[in-house]
Image: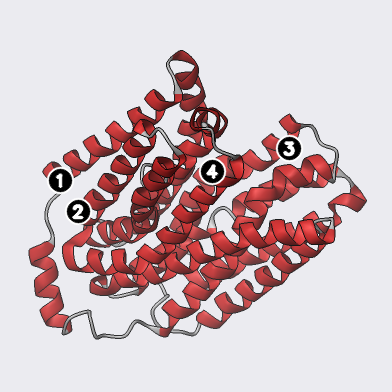
Amino acid sequence: MALGAFPIVGTAVVATALAADLDMSLTLFGAGVALNTLFGGLFAPLSGRLADLYGGKWSCVFVLVSSGLGLMVVALGRSSFELILGLLISSYGQGACNPATNKLVAERAAPGSRGTMTGIKQSGVQLGILLGGFTLPALSIWVNWRFAIGLYAVMALLGAALAAAALPDSREELTKDSRVAGGTENSSLPRSVSLLALYALCMGCVVGGVGRYTVLFAENALDMSNVRAGLVAGLPGGLAIATRIIWARLAEHRIAPPKALAIQSFLTVLVMLMLLAAVGVGSWIMWPAAVLSALGLNAWNAVAMLSVIIGVPQNQSGRASGRVVMGFMAGLTMGGFLTGLVADVTGGYETAWASLLVLSILATLLALRSTNQQGLAPTV
């Protein structure tokens, strides 16, 4: 998970040096990152089908190869075109890392331990952000940004080779399971998967909007320093390494996943209310909002992925994951763009935050609706 999502994380960390070296505007760089997310969402359904056909092992290998090759193209690139090409190559891994790892957990993790495993794997993205933030600036200073990005490219390709050599192949078992289940191509997914995809779309919009504009909002509207604004924005991600594991374990053993998702989106409603009130009450409210974000907005993805793993037949888990990830990636892309657009047009963040508040409420209603749908309840 960390390496699958690393291309946009890594390039964002070295964006200033990269843009200066390639003589490109930050707007063009942002467009390349947006293309990575957009095509990641488009690739998600295809990667889900490939996961059902080839199993978790080879799906994870494909993710690591995509990420490694994309990062290598970025590291060696001499123009903005090559940067965008590298981000496009790595977009498959961006969209496929969840379906691939979900399939691997569904195949290899025993019932009762899937929640913990899912939480750990979903924390991989946050771990990648921390690793990138700590290591890439230092490596860029000691050598240069190309070496820093290239090092992670080599790590991804070595990881692909190691996975191909060490992980057991499940294709024969998948073929048998498909025969028993009558195949996966024409079988319909549970309705709960569509509800979960809509939930992911709504929450993805909120993640995209809040995640990309918290620092600017804190600096411009609340007069916070860049350091304090950065801490407020980074705190939820750091805490989410733990909260994702805790929530996924609770969702397997204590709380049905739809109810857990409803709680998480309701916590997000509270976060949006705090952001709406921040200008009036003061910047102090950003700190409790950050903690609630770690519990809800930054942790729901682990519960959503667990819902697919334990609530959908194993031979459909790839397709189901792909549909949910497509919803999330679409929301992530639209949320970031539309939040900035609305803020520019209105001259403030109130309308944007209010819109994301409505989406958080809608996500809560979708989660409650899915409580009665077959396919999302714990199987153990």
Label 2: state its secondary structure: helix
Residue located 15% across and 46% down the image: 164
Q: Which residue is mark 3?
A: 229
Give the mark nearest the N terminus, 4 or 1.
4
Residue at mark 4: 29
Q: Which mark is residue 164?
A: 1
How far from the left and from the top, in percent, is residue 336?
62, 57
Looking at the image, tell me whether mark 2 or mark 1 is earlier in sequence order: 2
- Name the amino acid, label 4: Phe
Tell me the distance, in whole angstroms, between the alpha carbons under discs 3 and 4: 23 Å
Quarter of the image where the C terminus is located: bottom left
Which numbered circle lies on residue 144?
A: none
- Percent across and percent down for residue 205 are 60, 63
How far separated are the C-alphas under marks 4 and 2?
A: 33 Å
**SS at mark 4 in the image:** helix
Looking at the rendered image, the disc whose residue lies closer to the viewer, 4 or 1, is 4
Of residues 93 and 291, the one drawn nearer to the viewer in this rendering:
93
Whole-percent x, y for residue 152 in the image: 35, 32
Is 283 left, or right, of 30 in this rendering? right
Which of marks 3 and 1 precedes in the sequence?
1
Colour logic? secondary structure
**Whether residue 380 is situated above or below residue 105 in the rendered picture:** below
**Left or right of residue 33: residue 112:** left
Q: Are marks 2 and 1 in contact (CB under 8 Å)?
A: yes
At horizontal 45% and vertical 25% (from top left) the residue drawn is 145
Q: What residue does disc 2 label?
A: 57
What's under tag 3, amino acid-wise?
Answer: Ala
Residue pictured at 34% horizontal, 58% vertical: 96
Amino acid type shown at disc 2: Lys
